[in-house]
Image (spheres, rainbow, N blue to C red):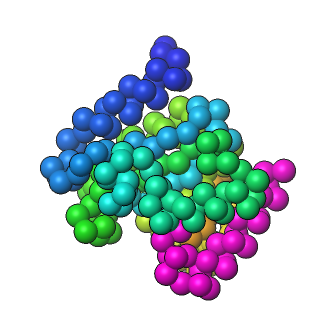
Amino acid sequence: MMNRKKALKALHDEIASCTRCSLHTSRTKAVPGEGPLDAKVMFIGEAPGAQEDMTGRPFVGRSGSLLTEMLNEIGLQREEVFITSVLKSRPPRNRTPHRDEIGKCMYFLDNQIEIVSPKIIVLLGSVAISSVIGPWRLSEAHGRFHEAKGLTYFLTYHPAAALRFPKTRALMHQDFQKLKAELR
């Protein structure tokens, strides 16, 4: 079997040329995700935004700056975690992903999780949570760990919500402290 590095590269090449849903017609670049193969933590967001679509890199806009800041606060460097999204192409005008788009992209996300095999998967926001582990009320679920299919998930808010709402930002900071405690 292919080694993990080759498997991840092949998967990311497949994402780059993906035409499974109509989003490929409006994207500039697919955004597979990035990070080390041996990342202990994987962060999963909703979908690429405008900056991500232009660069092909995940979380490089304002939300990415906040995520990087929060990682640094708990002693993690962006370069040591794997960062991706449920969707690998930007929805027009940053609209919420459609169920069929999510369904077509889950193949890629499931394979990334299997290849990287992180200790903890951090689900950022309700779209990531509902896509990966099913419906949860984020107001009740944030800051919690959830075990499913032999994997450990940590649920928190999306940085975009934290940028819009100071209360959410405070809650996300508290959540990251719980994550830090678990990573010790």
Q: Is residue 10 magenta?
A: no
Is 83 on the left or on the right of 28, as rendered? right
Task: Examine the rendering and report whether any part of residue 135 can be seen.
Answer: no
Extreme residue toward the top, this view = 1
Residue 23, percent from left and from top: 21, 53
Q: Name the residue at 59% across, 35% down.
A: 36
Q: Is residue 61 above or below residue 142?
A: above
Give the residues drawn in magenta, as a range: 158-184
Residue 98, percent from left and from top: 28, 63
Q: Is residue 165 magenta?
A: yes
3 or 35, nearer to the observer: 35
Is 156 on the left or on the right of 179, as rendered? left
Residue 111, percent from left and from top: 46, 36
Task: Examine the rendering and report whether any part of residue 56 can be seen.
Answer: yes
Residue 96, percent from left and from top: 32, 69
Q: Name the residue at 49% across, 65% down.
A: 63
- The picture quadrant where one finds residue 139 is bottom right
